[in-house]
Each structure stands twice: as C-alpha cells, then as structure tokens.
C-alpha cells in the first residue's frame, strides 16, 4: 500500500527537498526532532527493513553516500549526527516506506530512550 512518501516522490504534495537523483529522494522532516532532521528514502517503495532484497543494494548503498553529502552540506559532518532506520512496531516505524533519518545540529544524547 502506498504511503505519503509516494506522493512526495510524485510531487503530488509539497516537501522541502534537499536532494534528488534517479534512486533517492531526501527532504526535511515535517516534525523535526533536531536542528537538522532529514529523511532519505529510496524511490522504490520498500515497506520496511524486513523487505529489503538484493535488488535494493544499489539504492540502499547510495542512501549512505547521500547522507554523508547532506551532512557535509548542512555543516554537521564534523560535529556529528545520527542515522536511524526504524522497523515495525517496536522500532517505532510510522510510515511504511523505508527511510533513513539524518539527525544532527545538537548533541543527541543516549542512543535509546530509557524506559
Ligand atoms: P518513522 O517513525 O516512520 O521512522 O518516521 C516517519 C517520519 O516521517 C516522522 O519523523 C514524521 O515526522 C515524518 N513525516 C510524516 N509525514 C510526513 C510528511 O507528510 N512530510 C514530511 N516531510 N515528513 C513526514
């Protein structure tokens, strides 16, 4: 089933796009949790990390290259940042189109919230 991210890829709804190529789109999160909060997504619809196959290797490898480029563009490469991919309920995934969060611009604290 398609998600809101398919509509963003198709430019049917607006987004603050920071990068686009044939395989990848990156845009600012609508509810940022840090000064830089960008979502980097494969254009191919992959629901979750569980659904990744060998044919996705090129796109998912490029996610990291694009993340590094965006981090440099945002001026946070040296100070540091966090890349997150949430999967399903326990991972806190809300949009079922695989995406990488790029968060930075402040100290992000411990990796996981304490229960
Ligand atoms: P998840 O919890 O699935 O890992 O993250 C989904 C992210 O998508 C959330 O951080 C949420 O704020 C963001 N998001 C949801 N809908 C939209 C939208 O329509 N536009 C943008 N730019 N971000 C969205």
Image: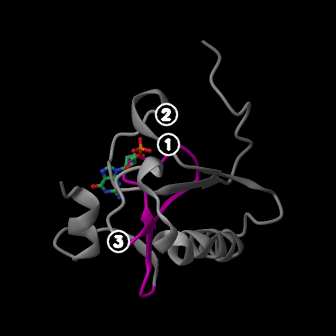
* SS under mark 1: loop
Residue 12 drawn at (x, y percent): 16, 72
| Residue 60 as seen in the image, left or right of residue 15 | right
Mark 3: few, some, or many residues within 10 Å (few <14, many ≥20)? some
* Residue drawn at the location 49% of the way across and 42% of the way down: 86
| Residue 98 as seen in the image, left or right of residue 35 | left
* SS under mark 2: helix
**Mark linked to residue 15:** none
Residue under pointer 3? 44
Question: Quick check: is the Cβ at mark 2 less than 8 Å away from ligand 1?
Answer: yes
Residue under pointer 1? 86
| Residue 15 as seen in the image, left or right of residue 104 | left
Which segment is the magenta one? 21-43
| Residue 98 as seen in the image, left or right of residue 85 | left
Most distant residue in the top direction: 115
Q: Is 33 above or below relative to 8?
A: above
For the C terminus, give its image quadrant. top right
């Amino acid at each position: 089933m398609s998600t809101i991210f398919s509509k963003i890829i198709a430019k049917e709804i607006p987004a603050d796009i920071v990068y686009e190529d044939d395989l990848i789109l990156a845009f600012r999160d609508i509810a940022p949790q840090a000064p830089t909060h960008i979502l980097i997504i494969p254009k191919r619809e992959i629901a979750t990390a569980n659904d990744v196959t060998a044919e996705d290797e090129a796109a998912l490898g490029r996610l990291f290259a694009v993340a590094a480029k965006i981090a440099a563009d945002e001026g946070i490469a040296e100070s540091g940042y966090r890349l997150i991919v949430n999967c399903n309920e326990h991972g806190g995934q809300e949009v079922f189109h695989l995406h990488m969060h790029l968060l930075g611009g402040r100290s992000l604290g411990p990796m996981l919230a304490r229960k």
